[in-house]
Image: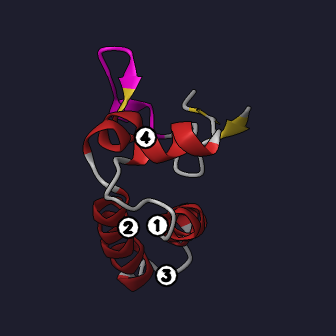
Amino acid sequence: MTKHPLIADTNKQYVKRGQHLIKELELELTVEQMIGACLFNRAKYYSRDKGTDHADTIKAEAYERYLVVLETCSYNARPVKLVSEYFKDAGKEFSYD
């Protein structure tokens, strides 16, 4: 199983009640809503200037990779589907650990 593009070893603080926040959002947001959230976060992390610290660039690139996944499925997610429903229908599985 492929590791989810947004899951990093350093973001364990996003795990609540045994479930990662990204997985919770995929259960609640449509593909289009998740694309919007990722576009926002990608822009936010690319706009930060911290000199030699590349952590924000790495985060922005993670959102870029996840956007590729979401954008390829957005055309097939009609009528509007939750991200989790699309992934299930498309047979996509990610590890959230």
Give the CA distance from mark 2 to mark 4: 15 Å
Q: Amino acid at mark 3?
A: Gly
Which amino acid does the dot numbered 4 rest on?
Glu
Mark 2 belongs to which amino acid? Ile
Q: In this picture, which residue range is highlighted in magenta?
A: 11-19
Q: Residue 84 has which mark?
A: none
Q: Is residue 61 above or below residue 85?
A: below
Say what secondary structure mark 1 lies in: helix
Q: Nearer the viewer, mark 3 or mark 1?
A: 1
Marks 2 and 1: in contact by CB < 8 Å? yes
The numbered disc on residue 85 is: 4
Residue at numbered disc 1: 74
Q: Which x, y percent locates residue 16?
A: 30, 22
Q: Which residue is more in the foreground, 51 or 58?
A: 58
Q: Residues within 10 Å of mark 3 (few under 14, many from 20)?
A: few
Report if the CB atoms under discs 4 and 3 are less than 8 Å apart: no
Q: Crowding at label 4, few (<14), some or many (≥20) Cα neighbours within 10 Å?
A: some
Q: Are marks 3 and 2 in contact (CB under 8 Å)?
A: no
Q: Identify the residue at the far front of this view.
A: 79
Question: For mark 2, what is the residue?
Answer: 35
Residue 93 is drawn in which quadrant? top right
Find the distance from the CA under tag 4 to the CA under tag 3.
40 Å
Q: Nearer the viewer, residue 33 or 20?
A: 33
Q: Which residue is mark 3?
A: 51
| Residue visible at 54% across and 31% down in the picture | 96
**Is residue 61 at least partly visible in the picture?**
no
Q: In this rendered view, identify the residue nearer to me: 9 or 74.
A: 74
